[in-house]
Image (cartoon, rainbow, N blue to C red):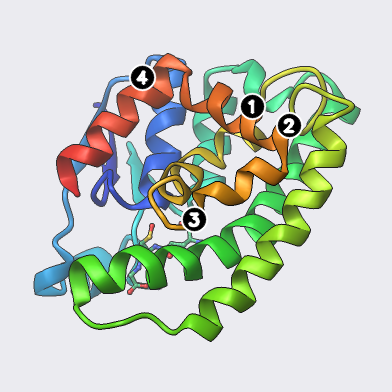
Protein backbone atom coordinates (compact mmCIF):
# COMPACT_ATOMS: atom_id res chain seq x y z
CA UNK A 1 0.00 0.00 0.00
CA UNK A 2 1.33 3.44 -0.96
CA UNK A 3 2.22 5.81 1.85
CA UNK A 4 -0.31 8.61 2.35
CA UNK A 5 0.35 12.26 3.14
CA UNK A 6 -2.64 14.25 4.34
CA UNK A 7 -2.61 17.97 3.51
CA UNK A 8 -2.05 20.28 0.56
CA UNK A 9 1.46 20.56 -0.97
CA UNK A 10 1.26 24.38 -0.67
CA UNK A 11 1.60 23.98 3.13
CA UNK A 12 5.25 24.28 4.05
CA UNK A 13 5.14 21.39 6.49
CA UNK A 14 3.49 19.13 3.90
CA UNK A 15 6.03 20.13 1.22
CA UNK A 16 8.89 19.16 3.59
CA UNK A 17 7.53 15.59 3.75
CA UNK A 18 6.89 15.42 0.00
CA UNK A 19 10.48 16.29 -0.88
CA UNK A 20 11.70 13.39 1.29
CA UNK A 21 9.34 11.00 -0.50
CA UNK A 22 10.66 12.30 -3.83
CA UNK A 23 14.26 11.93 -2.65
CA UNK A 24 13.79 8.22 -1.95
CA UNK A 25 11.60 7.63 -5.01
CA UNK A 26 8.73 6.31 -2.89
CA UNK A 27 5.23 5.58 -4.11
CA UNK A 28 2.86 7.88 -2.26
CA UNK A 29 -0.55 9.46 -2.37
CA UNK A 30 -1.40 13.02 -1.35
CA UNK A 31 -4.80 13.23 0.32
CA UNK A 32 -5.99 16.86 0.25
CA UNK A 33 -7.36 18.31 3.48
CA UNK A 34 -9.67 21.28 2.91
CA UNK A 35 -9.01 24.04 5.47
CA UNK A 36 -11.88 26.20 4.18
CA UNK A 37 -14.42 23.66 5.44
CA UNK A 38 -12.42 22.89 8.60
CA UNK A 39 -11.57 19.36 7.49
CA UNK A 40 -8.33 19.51 9.52
CA UNK A 41 -10.39 19.82 12.72
CA UNK A 42 -12.83 16.98 12.06
CA UNK A 43 -12.73 13.69 13.97
CA UNK A 44 -11.32 11.71 11.08
CA UNK A 45 -8.33 14.04 10.73
CA UNK A 46 -7.74 14.63 14.46
CA UNK A 47 -7.53 10.85 14.87
CA UNK A 48 -4.43 11.14 12.63
CA UNK A 49 -3.15 14.45 14.02
CA UNK A 50 -4.56 15.37 17.45
CA UNK A 51 -3.43 18.98 16.97
CA UNK A 52 -5.77 19.36 14.00
CA UNK A 53 -2.89 20.32 11.71
CA UNK A 54 -1.30 19.08 8.52
CA UNK A 55 0.60 17.04 7.63
CA UNK A 56 -0.34 13.68 8.92
CA UNK A 57 1.07 10.55 7.39
CA UNK A 58 0.21 6.88 7.09
CA UNK A 59 2.39 3.93 6.21
CA UNK A 60 0.38 0.75 6.75
CA UNK A 61 -0.59 0.68 10.43
CA UNK A 62 1.81 3.48 11.34
CA UNK A 63 0.31 6.95 11.64
CA UNK A 64 2.57 9.94 12.26
CA UNK A 65 2.34 13.71 12.55
CA UNK A 66 5.08 16.42 12.83
CA UNK A 67 6.73 16.98 9.48
CA UNK A 68 10.34 16.59 10.61
CA UNK A 69 9.65 13.30 12.41
CA UNK A 70 7.82 12.04 9.32
CA UNK A 71 10.72 13.17 7.12
CA UNK A 72 13.26 11.28 9.25
CA UNK A 73 11.09 8.16 9.18
CA UNK A 74 10.87 8.20 5.37
CA UNK A 75 14.61 8.78 4.96
CA UNK A 76 15.62 6.18 7.56
CA UNK A 77 13.24 3.59 6.14
CA UNK A 78 14.97 4.00 2.78
CA UNK A 79 18.54 4.23 4.15
CA UNK A 80 18.91 7.71 2.68
CA UNK A 81 22.25 9.49 3.03
CA UNK A 82 20.30 12.65 3.88
CA UNK A 83 20.17 11.68 7.58
CA UNK A 84 23.67 10.19 7.81
CA UNK A 85 22.42 7.31 9.96
CA UNK A 86 25.67 5.35 9.71
CA UNK A 87 27.82 8.13 11.18
CA UNK A 88 27.10 9.28 14.74
CA UNK A 89 28.81 12.72 14.64
CA UNK A 90 27.42 13.54 11.17
CA UNK A 91 23.91 12.43 12.12
CA UNK A 92 24.15 14.57 15.27
CA UNK A 93 25.08 17.58 13.11
CA UNK A 94 22.07 16.88 10.86
CA UNK A 95 19.80 16.70 13.92
CA UNK A 96 21.27 19.88 15.40
CA UNK A 97 20.81 21.97 12.24
CA UNK A 98 17.36 20.50 11.71
CA UNK A 99 16.45 21.78 15.17
CA UNK A 100 17.96 25.15 14.24
CA UNK A 101 15.76 25.22 11.15
CA UNK A 102 12.70 24.46 13.26
CA UNK A 103 13.39 26.92 16.07
CA UNK A 104 15.45 29.77 14.58
CA UNK A 105 14.34 29.88 10.94
CA UNK A 106 10.83 28.46 10.71
CA UNK A 107 9.46 30.42 13.67
CA UNK A 108 10.17 33.94 12.39
CA UNK A 109 9.48 32.82 8.80
CA UNK A 110 6.04 31.40 9.69
CA UNK A 111 5.07 34.85 11.00
CA UNK A 112 6.59 36.67 8.00
CA UNK A 113 4.75 34.35 5.57
CA UNK A 114 1.49 34.80 7.44
CA UNK A 115 1.84 38.58 7.58
CA UNK A 116 3.24 39.18 4.09
CA UNK A 117 1.54 36.49 1.99
CA UNK A 118 -1.40 34.80 3.75
CA UNK A 119 -3.08 37.94 5.12
CA UNK A 120 -2.99 39.95 1.86
CA UNK A 121 -3.63 37.01 -0.48
CA UNK A 122 -6.12 34.86 1.40
CA UNK A 123 -7.56 36.70 4.41
CA UNK A 124 -7.83 40.27 3.15
CA UNK A 125 -6.61 43.21 5.18
CA UNK A 126 -3.29 44.70 6.12
CA UNK A 127 -0.39 43.16 7.92
CA UNK A 128 1.06 44.44 11.17
CA UNK A 129 4.32 46.23 10.30
CA UNK A 130 5.68 45.94 13.85
CA UNK A 131 5.18 42.19 13.93
CA UNK A 132 6.88 41.86 10.54
CA UNK A 133 9.80 44.04 11.64
CA UNK A 134 10.27 42.10 14.89
CA UNK A 135 10.46 38.81 12.99
CA UNK A 136 12.69 40.17 10.22
CA UNK A 137 15.13 41.13 13.00
CA UNK A 138 15.00 37.57 14.38
CA UNK A 139 15.56 36.20 10.87
CA UNK A 140 18.60 38.45 10.39
CA UNK A 141 20.19 36.99 13.55
CA UNK A 142 19.62 33.49 12.17
CA UNK A 143 21.06 34.46 8.80
CA UNK A 144 24.18 35.88 10.48
CA UNK A 145 24.80 32.47 12.03
CA UNK A 146 24.07 30.71 8.71
CA UNK A 147 26.37 33.07 6.81
CA UNK A 148 29.27 32.27 9.16
CA UNK A 149 28.58 28.54 8.94
CA UNK A 150 28.13 28.47 5.16
CA UNK A 151 31.33 30.43 4.60
CA UNK A 152 33.15 27.41 6.12
CA UNK A 153 31.01 24.52 4.84
CA UNK A 154 28.96 24.02 1.68
CA UNK A 155 25.90 22.91 3.66
CA UNK A 156 24.69 23.38 7.23
CA UNK A 157 25.69 20.01 8.69
CA UNK A 158 29.00 19.92 6.77
CA UNK A 159 30.18 19.47 3.20
CA UNK A 160 27.27 17.18 2.41
CA UNK A 161 23.63 18.00 1.69
CA UNK A 162 21.22 16.69 4.31
CA UNK A 163 17.68 16.86 5.58
CA UNK A 164 18.74 19.94 7.57
CA UNK A 165 19.23 21.86 4.30
CA UNK A 166 16.24 20.45 2.42
CA UNK A 167 13.97 21.16 5.37
CA UNK A 168 14.42 24.88 4.71
CA UNK A 169 13.20 24.79 1.12
CA UNK A 170 9.43 25.32 1.47
CA UNK A 171 9.81 28.36 3.70
CA UNK A 172 12.82 29.73 1.78
CA UNK A 173 10.77 29.42 -1.41
CA UNK A 174 8.03 31.60 0.09
CA UNK A 175 10.59 34.08 1.47
CA UNK A 176 11.54 34.86 -2.13
CA UNK A 177 7.92 35.86 -2.81
CA UNK A 178 7.82 38.38 0.07
CA UNK A 179 9.05 41.98 -0.01
CA UNK A 180 11.94 40.78 2.22
CA UNK A 181 13.64 38.60 -0.42
CA UNK A 182 16.31 41.29 -0.89
CA UNK A 183 17.45 40.64 2.68
CA UNK A 184 19.47 37.78 1.21
CA UNK A 185 21.73 40.24 -0.63
CA UNK A 186 23.39 40.91 2.75
CA UNK A 187 24.17 37.20 3.21
CA UNK A 188 25.86 36.01 -0.02
CA UNK A 189 26.63 32.47 1.16
CA UNK A 190 23.05 32.02 2.36
CA UNK A 191 21.76 33.31 -0.97
CA UNK A 192 23.87 30.82 -2.96
CA UNK A 193 22.88 28.00 -0.58
CA UNK A 194 19.15 28.70 -1.02
CA UNK A 195 19.54 28.88 -4.82
CA UNK A 196 21.39 25.56 -4.73
CA UNK A 197 18.63 23.87 -2.69
CA UNK A 198 15.87 25.29 -4.89
CA UNK A 199 17.66 24.00 -8.02
CA UNK A 200 17.56 20.39 -6.80
CA UNK A 201 15.27 18.34 -9.12
CA UNK A 202 13.18 16.86 -6.26
CA UNK A 203 12.67 20.35 -4.83
CA UNK A 204 11.68 21.73 -8.24
CA UNK A 205 9.10 18.96 -8.58
CA UNK A 206 7.55 19.72 -5.18
CA UNK A 207 7.58 23.49 -5.92
CA UNK A 208 5.40 22.71 -8.97
CA UNK A 209 3.03 20.77 -6.70
CA UNK A 210 2.98 23.74 -4.26
CA UNK A 211 2.13 26.16 -7.09
CA UNK A 212 -0.64 23.88 -8.34
CA UNK A 213 -2.39 23.93 -4.94
CA UNK A 214 -1.79 27.60 -3.98
C1 LIG B 1 3.48 22.23 12.32
C2 LIG B 1 2.25 21.90 11.49
C3 LIG B 1 1.51 23.16 11.07
O1 LIG B 1 1.68 24.25 11.65
C4 LIG B 1 4.86 20.19 11.67
O2 LIG B 1 4.19 19.34 11.07
O3 LIG B 1 6.06 20.38 11.42
N1 LIG B 1 5.23 21.41 13.74
C5 LIG B 1 4.21 20.99 12.81
N2 LIG B 1 0.65 23.01 10.04
C6 LIG B 1 -0.15 24.10 9.58
C7 LIG B 1 -0.11 24.21 8.08
S1 LIG B 1 1.38 25.04 7.51
O4 LIG B 1 2.22 23.84 6.97
C8 LIG B 1 -1.59 23.85 9.97
O5 LIG B 1 -2.05 22.74 9.88
N3 LIG B 1 -2.29 24.89 10.39
C9 LIG B 1 -3.67 24.84 10.73
C10 LIG B 1 -3.92 25.00 12.19
O6 LIG B 1 -2.98 25.13 12.98
O7 LIG B 1 -5.11 25.03 12.53
Whether pointer 4 and pointer 1 mark residues with C-beta atoms closer than 8 Å, the reply is no
Mark 2 packing: few (<14 Cα in 10 Å), some, or many (20+)?
Answer: many
Mark 4 packing: few (<14 Cα in 10 Å), some, or many (20+)?
Answer: some
Queried on whether the Cβ of the residue with tag 3 lies below 8 angstroms from ligand 1, the answer reads yes
C-alpha separation, residue under disc 1 versus residue under disc 2: 5 Å
Q: x and y percent of residue 160 in the render?
A: 74, 18
Which residue in the protein does label 4 denote? 26
C-alpha separation, residue under disc 1 versus residue under disc 3: 28 Å
Between 186 and 16, the residue placed more toward the observer is 186
Q: Is residue 124 above or below residue 159?
A: below
Marks 4, 1: nearer the viewer: 1
C-alpha separation, residue under disc 4 versus residue under disc 1: 29 Å
Give the quarter of the image for residue 149.
Answer: top right
Which residue in the protein does label 1 denote? 192
The quadrant of the rendered image in which ligand 1 is seen is bottom left
> As drawn, is 102 to the left or to the right of 110?
right
Which residue in the protein does label 3 denote? 66
Marks 3, 2: nearer the viewer: 2
Q: Is residue 50 visible?
A: no
Whether pointer 1 and pointer 2 mark residues with C-beta atoms closer than 8 Å, the reply is yes
Q: x and y percent of residue 213 in the render?
A: 17, 45
C-alpha separation, residue under disc 4 versus residue under disc 2: 32 Å
Report helix, strand or loop for mark 1: helix
> As drawn, is 125 to the left or to the right of 159?
left
Q: Earlier in the sequence, mark 4 or mark 1?
A: 4
Marks 4, 2: nearer the viewer: 2
Whether pointer 1 and pointer 3 mark residues with C-beta atoms closer than 8 Å, the reply is no
Q: Earlier in the sequence, mark 1 or mark 3?
A: 3
Mark 1 packing: few (<14 Cα in 10 Å), some, or many (20+)?
Answer: some
Which residue in the protein does label 2 denote? 189
Amino acid sequence: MAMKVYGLPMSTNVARVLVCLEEVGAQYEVVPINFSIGEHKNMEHTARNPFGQVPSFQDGDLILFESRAISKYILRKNQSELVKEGDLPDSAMVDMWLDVESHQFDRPMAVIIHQCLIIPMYLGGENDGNVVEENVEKLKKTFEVYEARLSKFKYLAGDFISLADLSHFPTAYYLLATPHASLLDNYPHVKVWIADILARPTVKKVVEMMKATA
